[in-house]
Amino acid sequence: MGLFSRLFGDRFTQPPPDEPRLSDAAIMRELYPFGAQLKTFTHALLARLPEKERARLVRRVSRYYNLGEDPATALASGLLDAEKGQLLNNLVLMAVDVHSFDDFKYLVPKLIEASGIEQVYAYKLEETPSLMQVLIDFDHWLTGFGKRFLHVDTGGADYVGCIIEQDCVENLIALARQAGIDARLDPF
C-alpha cells in the first residue's frame, strides 16, 4: 500500500465511516431496548420474594428477553415455566386458561396464600359466569384486603395476572408500560 500511495497519492485509502463505531453494549441496547426496564418491573413485581429467589427469576426473565422474545412473553415464559419458573409456594404470576376453571380453582388458593391473605376465596358457578367475570369479582374481593389483581397482556389465550398492593397499582402499571408490557386492572 505504501508503494501505491507514493505513486498515485492517497487515492487508495478508505474514507472514514459515516457512522461512529458502536460498542457491544450500545448494540445490545439498540437490539433490546427494554432490558433494564423489564428487570426493574420484574424486580418490583417479585418484591415479596426472598432476594435469592427474586434474583434467579429476574435472570430467567432477562434470559428469555435476550433470546429475542418480546417483554410480556419473556415475563410469562420466565416466571410460568413449570420446571424452572416460580415455585407454587411463592406464586406471584398466574396464568389461567380462558375456557376452563380448573386452573383458576387450583392456582387461586396458592396465589392468595403466597400474597399473605389468610382468608379463602369462594365463588359460585351457579349461573356459569365467564372467567373474565370471575376475575373481576376476584379483584373486587381483593380490594377488601388492600390488594388488586393486575392483568398482564401476553398476547396469548390465557388470562395472566398477579396480586399486588393497592397503593402500588399506578407505579407497577407505569413500570410495565416503560418495559413494553400492557398491564391494567381490567381483563383483556
Image: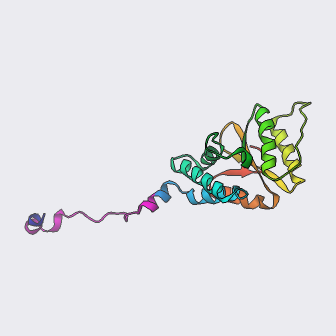
Please indicate whether residue 122 sits to the left or right of residue 156 in the image: right
Q: 31 above or below 77?
A: below
Residue at x-position 66% and y-position 38%: 156
Q: Quadrant of residue 73?
A: top right
Please indicate whether residue 24 sits to the left or right of residue 38 in the image: left
Q: Looking at the picture, how far across and down is residue 4, in whole percent?
A: 10, 64
Please indicate whether residue 137 sits to the left or right of residue 184 in the image: right
Q: Looking at the picture, how far across and down is residue 13, in whole percent?
A: 20, 64
Q: Which span of residues is magenta-colored?
A: 5-27
**Nearer to the camera, 44 or 90:** 90
Please indicate whether residue 106 sits to the left or right of residue 127 in the image: left
**Nearer to the camera, 83 or 175:** 83
Residue 177 appears in the rendering: no
Residue at x-position 74% and y-position 47%: 89
**Nearer to the camera, 184 or 161:** 161
Quadrant containing the N terminus in the rendered view:
bottom left
**Nearer to the camera, 60 or 65:** 60
Q: 10 above or below 143?
A: below
Residue 76 appears in the rendering: yes
